[in-house]
Amino acid sequence: MQQQPNQNGTQPMTQPPNMVSVKDHLYLTDMLSWNLNASKKAHFYAENCTIPEVRQTIEKACQMHEKHYQTILEHLNKKNQQMM
């Protein structure tokens, strides 16, 4: 199956590049920060919530952001180990 060009006419990448640009690095740093911050906030709100159903839902959000954070780190660590 051949991939279709996106809106600006370029083909999407099938593999990540071997090198991370400064802009990509900054975006990855932002993604890690966003997920860590969201996880910490969700954890704080869940600890202070008195409604069990709401608390459980907020804890799920906390776990989701922690998982995203760990997934990003795993991808970065795999790439870093492959380069060594």
Image (cartoon, rainbow, N blue to C red):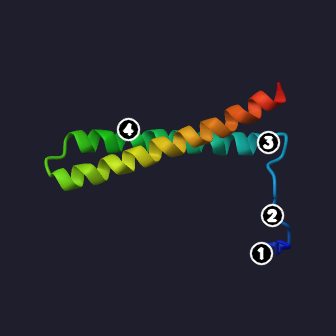
**Disc 1 marks which residue?**
7
Q: Residue furthest left?
A: 50
Q: Are marks 2 and 1 in contact (CB under 8 Å)?
A: no
Q: Residue furthest front?
A: 1
Q: Are marks 4 and 3 in contact (CB under 8 Å)?
A: no
Q: Tell me where residue 84 appears, x and y as whole percent.
A: 82, 24
Q: Earlier in the sequence, mark 2 or mark 4?
A: 2
**Disc 3 marks which residue?**
21
**Disc 2 marks which residue?**
12
Which numbered marker is on residue 16? none
Q: Tell me where residue 82 appears, x and y as whole percent.
A: 80, 31
Label 2 to label 3: alpha-carbon separation: 17 Å
Label 2, secondary structure: give it.
loop
Q: Is residue 19 left or right of residue 26?
A: right
Of tags 2 and 3, the one toward the viewer is 2
Query: Amino acid under label 3?
Result: Ser
- For the image, the number of numbered tags is 4
Q: Is residue 19 left or right of residue 28?
A: right
Q: Earlier in the sequence, mark 1 or mark 4?
A: 1
Q: Are marks 2 and 4 in contact (CB under 8 Å)?
A: no
Q: Earlier in the sequence, mark 2 or mark 3?
A: 2
Quarter of the figure with residue 19: top right
**Disc 4 marks which residue?**
40
Q: Foreground: 20 or 71?
A: 71
Query: Amino acid under label 2?
Result: Pro
Q: Residue at x 57, y 45 (%)?
A: 31
Q: Earlier in the sequence, mark 4 or mark 3?
A: 3
